[in-house]
Image (tube, rainbow, N blue to C red):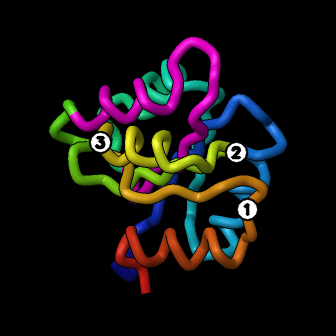
Amino acid sequence: MSGMSRVALTVDDSKTIRQMVSFTLKQAGFDEVWEAEDGRHAISVLGDKHVDIIITDLNMPNMDGFELLRHLRQDPNYKFIPILMLTTEGDDSKKQKGKDAGATGWIVKPFVPEKLIKVVKKVANID
């Protein structure tokens, strides 16, 4: 993947969380991190542009993380893009629902930057 620009999208209704994720991903070598405040905004930010990974919250206004997942998994451009859920929700039924909707992984907030980077690198196949 060297030579190519790495792009991520972080979706969260908390500006602070978006900034923390963005900072963490840039530390991990991402060139660009786009931000969206909810699922609907994420879809308009993406359009049909390529991203290497999407990190989304679950509980957001307008369109939550599950709805966003289902929407993106129906789009051929995003069917196989890794999508991580980054949320305060940790119970198994929610995790299963996320998996069923197409989540690649699940990280519970508050997140540890090193752990987030490790998971991102693993699921996005970044060395």
> Would residue 117 be counted in the magenta stretch?
no
| Nearer-N-terminus badge (2/1) | 2
Q: Residue at x 41, y 79 (%)?
A: 126
Determine the residue positioned at 62% across, 50% down: 90
Please state, as top left, top right, bottom left or bottom right, where the C terminus lies in the image: bottom left
Check disc 1 and report the residue beneath it.
111
Q: Secondary structure at mark 1?
A: loop
Amino acid on which the number 1 mark rests in the picture: Phe
| Residue interval drawn in magenta | 51-73
Q: Residues within 10 Å of mark 2 (few under 14, many from 20)?
A: some
Rendered image quadrant of residue 12: top right
Taking 115 as reference, is 100 left or right?
Answer: left
Q: Position of residue 10 (x, y in %)?
A: 59, 45
The image position of residue 53, as x and y in percent, is: 43, 56
Residue beneath the point at 55% across and 42% down: 56
Residue that label 3 marks: 100
